[in-house]
Amino acid sequence: MQVSAQQLAQILSGSVEGNPEVMINRPSKIEEGGEGSISFLANPKYEQYAYTTTASALLVQTDFQPKQDLPKGLTLIRVADVYASIAFLLEKFGEQQAAAREDMSATITKTATGAAIHESAKVSEGVSVGPYSVIEAGASIGEGSRIYAQVYIGAKAKVGKNVTLYPGVRIMHECVIGDNCVLHPNVVIGGDGFGFSPQEDGSYKKVPQIGHVIIEDDVEIGANTTIDRATMGATIIRKGAKLDNLIQVAHNCEVGQNTVLASQVGIAGSTKIGANCQIGGQVGFSGHITIADGTKIQAQSGVPSSIKEPNKAFFGSPIMDYKAFIRSFGVFKKLPELYKKVYQIEKQIQDK
């Protein structure tokens, strides 16, 4: 899909400020941009990126007034409802991507074990493919990788060298797995992010998720963990990260290099966890926050806001400094006894 800013503005019932002839071929996150992309500003929290974005066009509210100079050459498309407009564009770009995948030749080669490998897939030397696995059109598998039974690798997905995919792993279209990774049974990489737009009648309309997932080198992911594809751009698991079983990583999140996540951690959308963090089991993260490098969080903690100072330890829900929490908890356990003593003192005062 390639369309001019003027054509987009007409489709969205908006107006153009800047070059109406600039061509748009994809949506992008405002902090990533890129020539030929269109991004959007709907949340004031992200306004800082409007002044540095490299996108060719930016969707903004009709009454948006920049507080400083916008990047040279940036075209604004002013619309009444940015969220509705970007949802419409994502739907159109998503339909185009789906059509492109469906247009690919459907010729399948079946192995002796019943695995189905599309003729356009590239399977390197020394790769083993287990029974009833499926490798779709345009996918590629690096040398020495081991694919166990009933693994699914979607169209244009890329799997690196010496990767181990245990039974039931699902790698959806266009996702990327680096070298030396291990994905345990029933891991899902690239399922749709949880994006729905509320409608006036109380229903919800799905926001297409047209991004992908990038798993860098030397990552290990435990059984039944799910990592959602980005709405646009990429959800990223950085090099050397280790994820336990039953973890949920939402769309557009980033997990830093050599960070460790224990079982049942849940990370809401667009949260970025730094490098060398240690996160205990069942920790929950709010969306759109940033966690500093070296952060340690005790199990079952709740993280509602960003952590800016590196190498600190936290506990509680909502979290507080680890040592302060332990001291506070020591007092909490004594509250019944303390209350009894306070009640007795009050009674003595009243009797006087």
Image: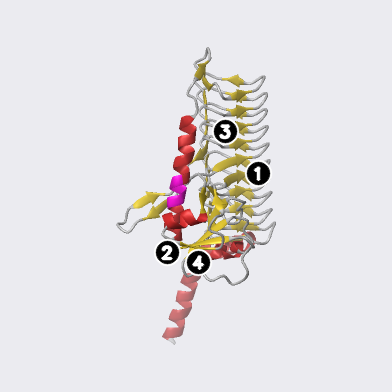
Task: Please give the residue where the numbered disc 1 appears in the rendered image.
Answer: 238
Q: Nearer the viewer, residue 221 or 194?
A: 194
Tell whether 229 sits left or right of 181.
left
Q: Position of residue 346 (x, y in %)?
A: 45, 80
State whether the magenta stretch is mostly helix, strand or loop: helix
In the image, which residues are magenta? 88-92
Task: Please give the residue where the numbered disc 4 appears in the rendered image.
Answer: 335
Give the class, few, some or many, for how many residues have Cα within 10 Å of label 1's Cα (few <14, many ≥20).
Answer: many
Q: Position of residue 22 (x, y in %)?
A: 56, 54
CA gap between label 4 and label 3 equals 57 Å
Task: Please give the residue where the numbered disc 2 appears in the rendered image.
Answer: 80
Q: Are marks 4 and 3 in contact (CB under 8 Å)?
A: no
Q: Which mark is residue 294?
A: none
Could you tell me the amino acid type at mark 4? Leu
Q: Residue at x 65, y 44 (%)?
A: 238
Looking at the image, is mark 3 or mark 1 nearer the viewer?
A: 3
